[in-house]
Image: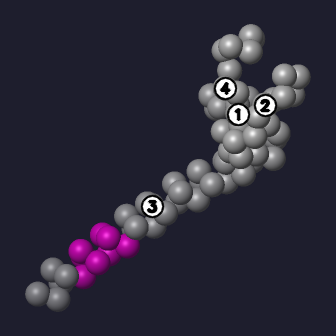
Amino acid sequence: MGVGNRAATCASCGKRLNRKQWYYRNGKFFCKKRCWVTEHEKAQQEAGKPEAAKKEAPAASTEAPAAS
């Protein structure tokens, strides 16, 4: 893979990628495995927030018609 085909900076921290050392996962380039882990954890937390909101919303809508 040539240098022209990949990103110049880490997708997580924005650090410039070294010519010999970079980490590629899920279509993104990272400077180290730790940056990928951080980005992965952040994505899981963001994905978990809408699920919690969806669980709360049906519970609130179910209670409203029962009270009427």
Which of discs 3 and 1 lies nearer the camera? The answer is 1
Q: Is residue 44 above or below residue 19?
A: below
- N-terminal-most mark, 2 or 1: 1
Quick check: marks 2 and 1 in contact, CB under 8 Å? yes
**Residue 62 in magenta stretch:** yes
Q: Nearer the viewer, residue 14 or 36?
A: 14
Q: Alpha carbon of mark 3 to alpha carbon of mark 1: how far?
A: 31 Å
Q: Alpha carbon of mark 4 to alpha carbon of mark 2: how far?
A: 8 Å
Quick check: marks 4 and 3 in contact, CB under 8 Å? no
Q: Alpha carbon of mark 2 to alpha carbon of mark 3: how far?
A: 34 Å
- N-terminal-most mark, 4 or 2: 4
Q: Which residue is mark 3?
A: 51
Q: Which amino acid is tagged 3?
A: Glu
Q: Main secondary structure of the magenta part?
A: helix
Quadrant of the image occupied by residue 20: top right
Q: Please state if 15 lies on the left or on the right of 65 as rendered.
A: right
What secondary structure is found at the residue carrying circle 1? loop
Q: Which residue is mark 2?
A: 17
Q: Which amino acid is tagged 2?
A: Leu
Q: Which residue is mark 4?
A: 7
Q: Alpha carbon of mark 2 to alpha carbon of mark 1: how far?
A: 5 Å
Q: Nearer the viewer, residue 3 or 30?
A: 3
What secondary structure is found at the residue carrying circle 3? helix
